[in-house]
Amino acid sequence: MKRRVFYSFHFANDYWRVQQIRNMGVIEGNTPVSSNEWEEVKRKGNDNIKRWINDNMFGRSCVVVLAGRYTSGRKWVKYEIEHAWKEGKGIVVVYIHGLKNALGEQDVQGDNPLKAFCIDKTFNYIVQHEIPADGNEINLSKVCKAYNPPYAYSGNVYDYISEHLDDWCEEAIRIRNQYPK
C-alpha cells in the first residue's frame, strides 16, 4: 500500500519539477492544484489558506518538502512544516533543483527549510528560530532528514528520487514517532 503524503513546495518556482515527482507514482501525494485554483484559495485570505493546507494535510502520514532555490523562505512552506510537526507527521526534505523545469533548466540548491525551526526535546513544541535557545532545544534539521540526489544529470536525479522516495518517507515517519505528539 502506498503512503499518502502531502507535498510542500514553492508553487511559482518549482511546479514543473514537483509534477515530475507526482507522476512517478511511488507514493500517493495530494491532488495537484492548478495555478488558478491556488490563486482562488489565496484570494480568500490567510485563514482560508491555512484551512486549505490543514484539510489537504489531513489523513497524510508524511510531509515531503520538495526544496528548490527559494523554498526555505516561503511563508506557507514554513506553516506546513510547523503544522506537520504539531500533527505528528513525518517530515522529509528532498532537493529538486537538479530536475529540469519546463524550459529544460536546472537550478541551484536552496537552503534547508528545516533550519528555520527548533523543537523542544522534552515538551514537544516547535518554534521558528534557527539557534537553539537552551540545552532543551534542537534544530529540526538535526532531527529530520534532507536528501540531495548525488547526480548532475536530471534523468539520474529523477531515477534516484523515484528509487528512494518511499524509503525516505518511511524513515521520516519512524523518526517522528520517536517524539511525543
Image (cartoon, rainbow, N blue to C red):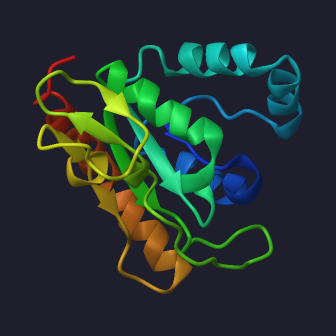
> Residue drawn 65% across and 73% down?
100
Q: Quadrant of the C terminus?
A: top left
Q: Is residue 102 left or right of residue 176?
A: right
Q: Is residue 73 left or right of residue 162?
A: right
**x and y, in percent, of residue 60 in the image:** 41, 22
**x and y, in percent, of residue 139 in the image:** 27, 49
Do we see residue 72 in this rendering?
Answer: yes
- Work out whether 158 lies above or below 45: below
- Work out whether 56 lies above or below 159: above
Name the quadrant containing residue 136. top left
Q: Is residue 127 left or right of residue 7?
A: left
> Residue drawn 60% across and 53% down?
73
**x and y, in percent, of residue 46 in the image:** 74, 21
Q: Quadrant of the N terminus?
A: top left
Do we see residue 6 in this rendering?
Answer: no
Spot the residue most to the bottom.
Answer: 152
Name the quadrant containing residue 162. bottom left
- Work out whether 53 lies above or below 51: below
